[in-house]
Each structure stands twice: as C-alpha cells, then as structure tokens.
Image (cartoon, rainbow, N blue to C red):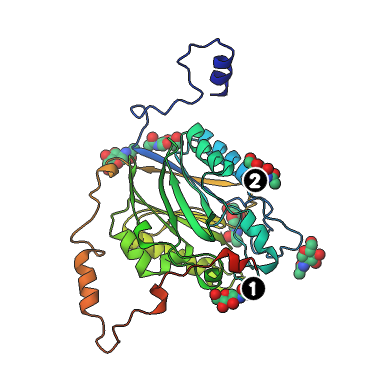
Amino acid sequence: MRFLLLSALAGIASASVLPWTPADPTTVDYNNLTVALVRAEPANWPLPVMNKNWTGVHFDINATVSKAVTLIEEAAENGANLVVFPELWFPGYPKGLADNVSIAPYIQDYVDNSLEVGTPQWETLINAAKDNGVYLVPAFSHRDGNSIYMAQALISPEGEVLLLRHKLRPSGGERTIWSDGDIDELKVIATPYGRWGLLECWEHFHPAMTYNIQSQAETLHIASWPYTPNPADASAAYWESAEVNVAAARLFAVNTGAPLVYATVGNARFLDSQGLDITVVNASVPLDSVPLVYTSFNTTGLANTVPYTIDGEQSYGILQQINAGFPSFIPQVVGTFVQKNIVLLSDLLN
Ligand SMILES: *[C@@H]1O[C@H](CO)[C@@H](O)[C@H](O)[C@H]1NC(C)=O
Ligand SMILES: *[C@@H]1O[C@H](CO)[C@@H](O)[C@H](O)[C@H]1NC(C)=O
Ligand SMILES: *[C@@H]1O[C@H](CO)[C@@H](O)[C@H](O)[C@H]1NC(C)=O
Ligand SMILES: *[C@@H]1O[C@H](CO)[C@@H](O)[C@H](O)[C@H]1NC(C)=O
Ligand SMILES: *[C@@H]1O[C@H](CO)[C@@H](O)[C@H](O)[C@H]1NC(C)=O
Ligand SMILES: *[C@@H]1O[C@H](CO)[C@@H](O)[C@H](O)[C@H]1NC(C)=O
C-alpha cells in the first residue's frame, strides 16, 4: 500500500491508483474468521498485572494509540480479521484508582488522555482498521462533552463506526468517575461473518445487560475485561479474580450458545459455545512475548442467522414469565439504580 502511494506520487502508476483500496468483498472468505485479542498492556501501565503503583506514572493516549496501531498491524499480518482490546485500554484501566477519591491526583491527566471521537487519535484508529482491512473493537475512556464514558466501538474494515456504546452501568467506584450509557446501545450487529455483540466486564453479571444482548442471537460475543490475574492469585479481590470473571464469561457463552472472546490484560482466553476454553494464555506469560492471542472460527452460514428465536430461553415470552412471576410482595417501585447517572467533569475536575 505504501509502495502504491509512493508510485502514485511519483507519477509511475496510473491515475486510478488510490492510496487505499477497499477489500474486494468477493475475495474475502467470510467462512473463516480469525480473531486476535490484545493481552498486552497500554503505554505506561504498571506491571506486573496486579501492580497498582502509579507513583510517577502518566497516562499517554498518543503512545497508547501508537502501540495499538503496531499491534493491529501485527495481528493483520498474522491473518486476523477482527482485533479486540481490553476494557479502557485507551488510555489504560486505572487499576487501584477506579473511584473519584483515589483517582483525584490523576483525574486531570486521565481526562486529558481520554479519547474523543473525531480527534487525530481517533482517526488514527479508524485508518488502522482501513489500512489493515480488519474489524476493530477498541475499548476506551470516551470523552464526550462534560463527561467521560466506558466505551466500546465496532469499526468495520471500511472505517465505518458500526456501533459506539457506553457501559450501561459502570461498576462500584467506577460510577463516581464515568457516566452511564443508554439501553438503545445494547445492539447486536450483523456482519458478513455473523452476529456480533459487545459487553464490558461486570455487565456480564447483570440480566439487564446480558438478557437483551442474548435475545438477539449472537454468533460471537466480544467481551472486554480490564485485566485478569491467574486463578488463586491471593492479591486479587473477588471482583478482579479470574475465578469470578471467567465464571461469568462461561455462563454467558452457554446461555448465548456462541463462542466468546475474553480480551483482558494478562490471563486472556477464547471460550467455545459450551463455555469451555479454546485457547488460554495466562498472566505469567510475559505480555511483550505474547501480546496477541489468535483463534480462527468456522463461520460458514452464520451470516444467515435469524436475529431472534421466539422459542429461546432469552425470548419475549420468558420476559413476560419473569414479569408475571415477580413476587407480589415487592413494591412496584423503580429504584435509583435504573436512573441514568451522569458525572460532570466540571465537578470531577474541581
Ligand atoms: C511506588 O513506586 C515508586 C516510584 O517507583 C516507589 O518510590 C515506591 O516505593 C513504590 N511504592 C510501593 C508501595 O511499592
Ligand atoms: C498527540 O497527538 C496529537 C495528534 O497527532 C498532537 O496534536 C499532539 O500534540 C500530541 N500530544 C502530545 C503530548 O504529544
Ligand atoms: C482460517 O484462517 C486462518 C488464518 O488465516 C488459517 O490459519 C486457517 O487455516 C484457516 N482455516 C480454514 C479452515 O481455512
Ligand atoms: C465522589 O462521588 C460521590 C458519589 O457520586 C460523591 O457523593 C462525592 O462527593 C464524590 N467525592 C469527591 C471527592 O469528588
Ligand atoms: C502459565 O502458562 C505457561 C505457558 O503455558 C505455563 O508454563 C505455566 O505453568 C502457567 N502458569 C500458571 C500459573 O498457570
Ligand atoms: C464449516 O462448517 C460448515 C457448516 O457447519 C461445514 O459444512 C464445513 O465442513 C466446516 N468446514 C470446516 C473446514 O470445518
């Protein structure tokens, strides 16, 4: 591609040569999907995986985007069609700082290094998808107006943003930093390889997030977790342990009947549609020696999957049954968890 561009500039090639040529859909094999998940750390992220010492460390969105482009190029060279990043990889999950009090000394730096749509950094990611002909799922701290959100996007090899979603309910202390997403963003996207759905980390524990995605007949589930240690790591709290989070992923895969991409820094894996491991690379394996993990899926016929199952376990009928069977002694009051929480940067940066 670079050669063609140089040739065009030198007037050697004909005027019809473009710096970028879209992949010819008739030559793409949509029956074989190769997914690369990123398990390397973002720029300036303390290591090893459970190290939460941020003293003297700065978030760096530019260096993180540059590192991402290198990883995307490597993945594409190895045949990947889809590259998936861990949660808040841009500019880095603030492990140990993920509440408004702990992050206070770093919040200006964090917000300054959150990703805005339409900026040169964002366009660099869009161009990386196009130049390498891959689908891309970046997971990032999204600065939008007077708030930041825990975002995931699905970008096509043509550079089109097919989905831009925000974690519906950030978890625990996260709720004091990032604002809530919207329910209409719980959308499964039809691609030529099949139906892809996206969720982040603790969303996999909430029926309000899992049920709506599972009802839409995914053929591949794309999950971004921030970081995962090895099982039995005594330094891990239950909510960051491999045991608890991988259990949620296994349950999700079984309930969906689709394989699952578990992108996370450290202990990363692919699960099959029965919730069992296909490939695991544990957190003891140096991130720079295995920055990406690959699996190929036979996707023959999946693009024709009907977008819902009337008789399924996550169906309209079951939803009515849950509603009808809801205990009558519980007052029919909509609690505060359902209300959309917005954290204003003007308050956070005070
Ligand atoms: C954290 O890192 C700083 C800078 O490298 C170092 O001085 C300090 O001792 C570390 N703190 C702990 C608790 O390890
Ligand atoms: C980051 O990259 C942007 C766009 O390429 C550039 O304008 C900006 O100066 C860079 N920032 C730093 C701190 O290097
Ligand atoms: C699918 O693609 C991968 C990566 O290009 C390749 O290694 C694998 O052999 C392919 N599988 C089939 C069944 O063609
Ligand atoms: C942290 O967030 C909580 C809940 O939103 C809020 O009540 C509190 O005032 C905030 N504290 C600081 C130091 O910003
Ligand atoms: C991690 O994986 C490596 C390479 O497969 C293996 O040698 C090592 O025993 C594993 N460690 C743990 C804690 O599972
Ligand atoms: C892929 O799946 C299709 C449909 O189930 C099957 O006919 C085909 O043999 C499979 N291809 C490979 C290479 O396993």
How crowded pointer 1 is (Cα within 10 Å; few <14, some 14-19, many 20+) is rated as: few
Position of the C terminus, as image quadrant, is bottom right
Q: Looking at the image, in which quadrant does ligand 3 appear? A: top left
Residue 94: x and y in percent read: 62, 62
**Number of numbered discs overlaid on the protein picture:** 2
- Asked if residue 211 is positioned above or below residue 281 in the image, the reply reads below
Q: What element carries label 1?
A: loop
Identify the residue shown where x is 54% and y is 54%.
140
Tag of residue 62: 2
- Residue plotted at (42% across, 75% down): 337
Q: On the rendered structure, is 64 left or right of 189?
A: right
Question: Does residue 114 lie above or below 18 as drawn?
Answer: below
Residue at 27%, 89% (x, y): give it: 329
Q: Which residue is drawn at 76% across and 60% down?
A: 56
Tag of residue 101: 1
**Is the residue at mark 1 in contact range of ligand 4, meaning its CB lies under 8 Å from it?**
yes
Amino acid type, residue under disc 1 in the picture: Val
**How far is the residue under mark 1 from the one under mark 2?**
26 Å
Residue 63 seen in render: yes
Q: Tag 2: residue type?
A: Asn
The secondary element bearing badge 2 is classed as helix
